[in-house]
Amino acid sequence: MSQRNEDKCLEIIKSTEETADKILMNKQELIALDKRRQQNREAIRELQKNHEDKEEKKVWITVGSMLLKMPREKALNLLKNDQVEIEREINILQSDQKILVNKHRDLEHFSSYSGTNIKPLERKELNALKANLPMM
């Protein structure tokens, strides 16, 4: 094997490994974000449930590594906004993950997964489909 072929093989292996590392890092970040999303969901539910039981004006909330006492509605809004941001980050990472997996499969000379580029129907598309289907 010539030096040129060896260099080319090493470059292919290196890019394959780098892509695989990115996939694994994204997976770990997705797991951490999902855990945070679940904790936020639990906190939102607890604040809503406690609001029905008690009429406390202020609640304790953890923001990062700080413990703060703030009005219930402000804390609830803060958690809901954080939940929206987490969902957005998860969606971005999931779409990046699909691209990275297909790139990795391409580097290994495999065909891409057939179901990775499927997107759900939008509300308008679904309504148009329902309007044109015969009733049973």
Image (cartoon, rainbow, N blue to C red):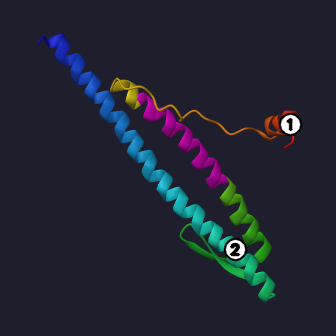
Closer to viewer: mark 2 or mark 1: 1
Residue type at the position of mark 2: Arg
Nearer to me, 65 or 102? 102
Residue lying at 65% horizontally and 73% vertically, measured from the top left: 43
Residue lying at 81% horizontally and 35% vertically, measured from the top left: 129
- Quadrant assignment, res 72: bottom right
Q: Which residues are magenta?
A: 85-103
Q: Which mark is residue 134?
A: 1
Which residue appears farthest toward the left when viewing the image?
1
Establish if 105 lies above or below 52. Answer: above
Residue lying at 72% horizontally and 62% vertically, measured from the top left: 80
Q: Most prominent secondary structure in the magenta stretch? A: helix
Q: Which mark is residue 12?
A: none
Q: Quadrant of the N terminus?
A: top left
Residue 122: horizontal and vertical position, in percent? 76, 38
- Quadrant assignment, res 61: bottom right
Residue type at the position of mark 1: Pro
Q: Is residue 100 magenta?
A: yes
Q: Secondary structure at mark 2?
A: helix
Residue 86: horizontal and vertical position, in percent? 62, 54
Q: Is residue 71 visible?
A: no
